[in-house]
Image (cartoon, grey):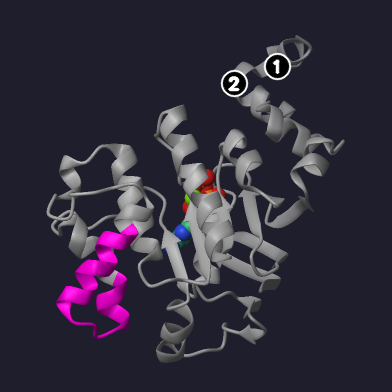
Amino acid sequence: MLEIRDLHKHLGGKHVLRGVNLTVPTGEALVIIGGSGCGKSVLLKHILGLFKPDSGQVLVDGEDTVPLPERELFRVRKRFGMLFQGGALFDSMTVADNVSFALDEHSKLPASEKLAIVQKKLAVVGLKGVEKVYPADLSGGMKKRVALARAIAADPDFLLYDEPTTGLDPIMSDVINELIVKLKTTLNVTTIVVTHDMASARKIADKMAMLHEGTIRIHATPDELYASDDDVVKRFINGLASVEQMKEVWGEEAEKRMAK
Ligand SMILES: Nc1ncnc2c1ncn2[C@@H]1O[C@H](COP(=O)(O)OP(=O)(O)OP(=O)(O)O)[C@@H](O)[C@H]1O
Ligand SMILES: [Mg+2]
């Protein structure tokens, strides 16, 4: 189980996280939504221990990881797989080397065993025969799948995805979503997905949370979230700009445009 308690973080002079509280029970999938720049990626990096909060706790199966020194964090991080925003494959490394990266970091398996694991994980994401290919020669969808294979290489208990479908066509997005659901259900992986893609969110989420102005505005089932009468939530799911945002674009005409 993952618990985030009263997390605060200033970055670049901005109070980005202002008391975030969230609980994700083991085996559950939480989808985090929220406007661009609101702190979703920053929140994921706190869960991985890549950022230290100003205050607050990140509990992984009850253990607060915030005070842990780097060496101990390594032990906790081993249990996490992360799909970074943009994929972040190593361009100078083959697909096989990319996927086995976590294995190289965390274990001392012989090369033949590592290759077997790499092939098995690539098969899970529906890829075959690409071990020796370099990322530059793969399509966007294939890159995401390689990144996913890398995230699951070391059999994580927790999987974090940052915008897994951004830049993909709707069909490939759906394939990635199905993979996320499959990994959750077959491996009982506790899952957090950050996305702007509401179709993905509905497909994946047991629960959804909206990050807004540094706190969790709503944490609920997808049905509850869609039925919410909170104006901020409603505007987000319907993709409608706020009065202030409309004024930045239309000035005096903003209110007239919003009435349409
Ligand atoms: N290392 C950093 N140093 C300074 N400011 C940072 C750093 N990382 C993030 N920020 C700031 O924190 C805020 C939140 O950034 P974050 O990347 O978490 O947004 P996001 O919700 O993931 O946005 P998007 O949906 O566009 O990916 C932004 O204002 C960003 O500029
Ligand atoms: Mg982000």
Q: Give the residue number, with chain letter if any, for mark 2.
A: 249
Quarter location, residue 67: bottom right
Tag of residue 90: none
Tell me residue 62's x, y (percent): 67, 84
Between residue 167 and residue 191, name the one nearer to us: 191
Asked if the residues shown at circle 1 and circle 2 are in contact, with their CB atoms under 8 angstroms apart, the answer is yes
> Which of the two residues, 18 or 244, is positioned nearer the viewer here?
18
Q: Is residue 234 left or right of residue 169?
A: right
Which residue has dot 1 on it? 254
Ranked by sequence position, the earlier of labels 1 and 2 is 2
Is 97 situated above or below 85? below
> Where, quadrant-wise, is the N terminus in this rendering?
bottom right
Name the amino acid type tagged 1. Answer: Ala
Tell me, yes or no, if residue 12 can be seen here: no
Query: What amino acid is labelled 2 in the image?
Result: Val
Q: Is residue 17 magenta?
A: no
In this picture, residue 94 sits left or right of residue 100: left
Q: Position of residue 96 (x, y in %)?
A: 20, 61
How many numbered callouts?
Answer: 2
